[in-house]
Amino acid sequence: MFGKKEETSLPVIGFLQAAGLVAYCGLVALLFWQGEHWFGKVANFLGPLLFLTLFIVSALICALIALGYPVILFWEKKKKTEAVHLIAFTAGWLVCFVFVFILLTLLF
């Protein structure tokens, strides 16, 4: 049971990273969609300030999700090719998610 650890393939890791990005973006989209209902109308500069701060935090979170493990592969494990392939797999899965969302939007 605790013997040899099998490594997860790069396409699977890319899928999981892309799914994590989609899940996070879904939470942010839910906040944008229902924000006025939950918090009321913001009539001062705090609304734009919150949006810009959330934008910056989102960029950092997305970078950590998408690039965290590739950076570890690149710098610590010295697996440069695998790091680039993982980024490509993550981007490819994100494109697949976009096409699925476009199809769902057109169907419903």
Image (cartoon, rainbow, N blue to C red):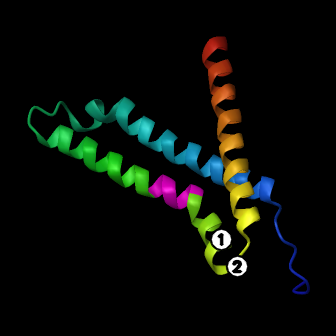
Residue at 19% from the left image edge and 44% from the top image edge: 49
Residue at the extreme bottom of the image, as rendered: 3
From the image, tell me which residue sits under label 2: 77
Q: Is disc 2 in contact with disc 1, using a CB cutoff of under 8 Å?
A: yes
Residue 52 x, y percent position in the rendering: 26, 44
Residues in magenta?
61-66
Q: Which residue is mark 1?
A: 74
- The residue sitting at 58% across, 43% down in the picture is 22
81 to the left or right of 1: left
For the residues labelled 2 and 1, the Cα–Cα distance comes to: 6 Å
Q: Is residue 21 above or below residue 69?
A: above
Query: Could you say where residue 77 lies in the image, as x and y percent from the top left?
Result: 70, 79
Residue 4, relative to residue 74: is it above or below?
below
On the image, the x and y values in percent for residue 106 come to: 63, 12
Q: Residue at 63% of width from left, 21% of height from top?
A: 102
Q: Nearer the viewer, residue 101 or 76?
A: 76
Q: Quadrant of the N terminus?
A: bottom right
In the image, residue 15 sits, relative to residue 92, either above or below, namely below
| Prevailing SS of the magenta stretch | helix
Q: Which of 77/33 is in front?
A: 77
Q: Secondary structure at mark 1?
A: helix
| Figure check: 72 above or below 87 | below
Q: In the image as oriented, which residue stretches furthest toward the left?
A: 44
| Label 1 CA crowd tier, 10 Å (few <14, some 14–19, many 20+) | some
